[in-house]
Amino acid sequence: IIEGDTLVSTQHYEKSLKCYLSALEEISTNHQCVQPVITSDVCLAYIYGRIGNAYAKLEQYSIAAMYHHRQYAVALEADNSRCQIISCLSLGCDYQGELDYVSANEWFDEALYKSISARDEVLQTVSHRALQLICEKLNFSDASLKHSEAIQSIVSKRKQHIDGVVNSAIQLQTRLMNGNAKEVVVIQLEQTTNFHLTLKKKRSMLQSSITKALNDKSHIAIEIQRIEDSLEKVYAEIKECCAKNPQKVSSRCMHGLMQVIDSNVLQEILKVDAKKLNDGLENLIKKSKQKDADILNLHYDLEGINKDISVEEGPLITKVMKPSEACRCMQFNYKNTSLNDINCSHTNESIPFLVVSKGSSIYVNHLRTGELQAIFSGDEYHTLHAGEPLGHRTIVTCLFFRDKRVFSGSMDQSIMCWDIETEKRVFVAKGHEGTVTCLWVDHEKMISGSADSFIIIWDKDTGAVFRRVSGHMRGILSLECGLTWCVSGGSDGVICVWQCLSRFDDPDYHEFTCKTTLRFGDACKITALSCGALQVVSGNNLGKVVLWWLKTEEIIQSCDAHKGSVTSLQFDATRIVSSGTDGNVCVIDIFTGYRLATIRSEQNTDVRVESIAFDSEGISGAYTDGSIRHFQWVSSSWNTQATSKVDSLNGIKDATFLHTGMRILVRKKETEEDGELKQEQQTNVSKEQEKLHNQQHAGGLSTRLFSKWQNLLESRALQNA
């Protein structure tokens, strides 16, 4: 039957007939050839139908109708409704081929009735379409319109059903996407123009100036009130002196002490004080009026800036600023990773920023709010000005963010260093002859890799070249380094492990040499690297995450983590976290190589995870749609808060003192057999101790020997436990 169907699909109808007739002969003589999942009658009906279809293709409609009648009869005997409907439709087509539209209409009507009874919407649609064509042939326009409306109704109903199923699948996908994360905090990075950012900074400065001016004015008002109160007292005292003239009066105006003074002398002193107070009051009133004028001017300036900002935030600029291109590079601060504080929630030393590149420009956003802090604009080729370029001339291809400095590499073969506090460029480093593809900076140096297959070691403060080394046959795609080591991965599928001395011992890095070469294969490219003391974890463009043991240069574990290139890696003592161009974040068990979790991306397959970082609280991912997503660990095997108390076996009383990757001893849960064994062991130890005491009392053991045996018994009991 399958051979006959294949011949029909290739339009060899006569040969297909031979196959079907052979099958018909076989099933007529031997009913055992049919599988038990389908009855021989149904199989016979389908063979009759196929023979009829083959004759219909040969335009022998009368013979085709004969076999379709047989199919219908057998289907009625087998009580197979679907086969009956198909045979009715086939008979209608046969009569339609013979131009007998009345008979064709009757069989199509029968097919429609049976399909409605069977609630088969697909065959209902086919029947309605067949009847619509027949009605058009017979000029029954009303009936044709009725069938057309019925088709539209069924199609619309099925579309609604399919849309509902698709929506359910999307909801399920959304639940699965973050099924391994307790909470997902999505922070959208602000996107704006440099002018808009400058306006916002000016507005912030003006608001601070207005606040300061208002505070100064309130202080002046308090001082004016104090002087007025003092004047009132002075005038009251002058009035009192005039009333007692020329008698002696008591006053505190001299040195602040109560003294008896002649009233005329006191009047003169008080008049001098009143003059000084009046002069001070006039100065303060002038200052107050000046502050009012300053505040008014500041408000006018603020109003003008708010108008400009409203234009920048208006619909026209917003439409223009819609993200037309995805983020090319995104980097968390390396210092936060080393402090185990990715989200800057524990220590004041963390840097709460993320750097992003789009085209030739670099953006600095706040990690927790997404607010744009600074823009290091690129200097496009069409921009003409005197002097050196102000920024990169072409696309930024790599970033590294350490402390308060951003290091960027570009297709223009240069490396630039930027300070996020001063928002100025620190230096420009030139030396590569190809696109700068990767960067890494430690306490002493900056190392870069390029498409020219060379590694250059630079001074991280000035951009001066220390040394230029080669070890790869093709371009370098990934780098990581420390004070005395470096690992590099290239598009040749090779990982080079370099060793070096510190800058104090080797200022020019002459001892920077390749110690080990790990080769995965020429067909792959090493796109991500992370190195430990004894092992290296690599990711390639095939989506594989591989754990290498440096001592033997062998692969310990390998995991097919992603469907695209691996973009970023980080690992600790127990797990590897990787991100890829498929938009997923994978958590891999470092001991088994199995995927513990996959945090899936949304429907938009164009969004990829450019960078990831994790600490003991969770994972943070930077996505190329301009968002940061924070996921919290939930698995009890990962979460250090899963157990409230830990016994003193490890010297740790509370689980909050545990840290990720820490090896601890755990007490095995006792079964009934364990309890009986423990009781038997305790009984044996008690008997041995009792025997030991008896021997000592009998004078058989010295005190020193008795103590030694007792310690041995206690250690044996502890070992058994």
Image (cartoon, helix red, strand yellow):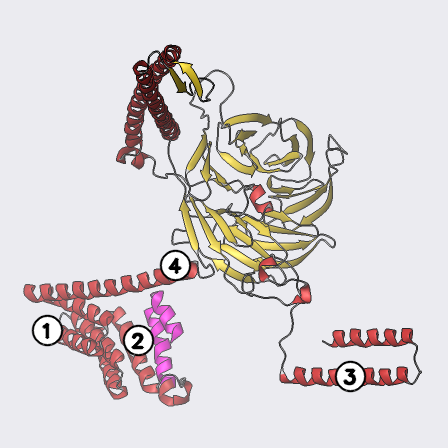
Q: Is residue 663 left or right of residue 184?
A: right
Magenta stretch: residue 610 in it?
Answer: no
Which quadrant does the C terminus fall into? bottom right
Amino acid type at circle 3 is: Ser
Give SS at disc 4.
helix
Percent coordinates x, y for residue 316 in the rendering: 27, 33
Q: Earlier in the sequence, mark 1 or mark 3?
A: 1
Give SS at disc 3.
helix
Q: CA distance from mark 4 to mark 1?
A: 54 Å
- Residue 606 appears anywhere in the view: no
Which label lies toward us, 4 or 2?
A: 4
To which residue does mark 4 refer? 174
Q: Residue at x 48, y 15 (%)?
A: 386
Image vertical order of residue 107 relative to residue 372, above or below: below
Which label lies toward us, 2 or 3?
A: 3
Image vertical order of residue 212 relative to residue 591, above or below: above
To which residue does mark 1 refer? 102
Rendered image quadrant of residue 57 = bottom left
What residue range appears in magenta? 1-26
> Residue 686: which numbered mark, if any?
3
Question: Label 2 near label 4: C-beta < 8 Å?
Answer: no
Which quadrant does the N terminus fall into? bottom left
Give SS at disc 1.
helix
> Residue 50: which numbered mark, if any?
2
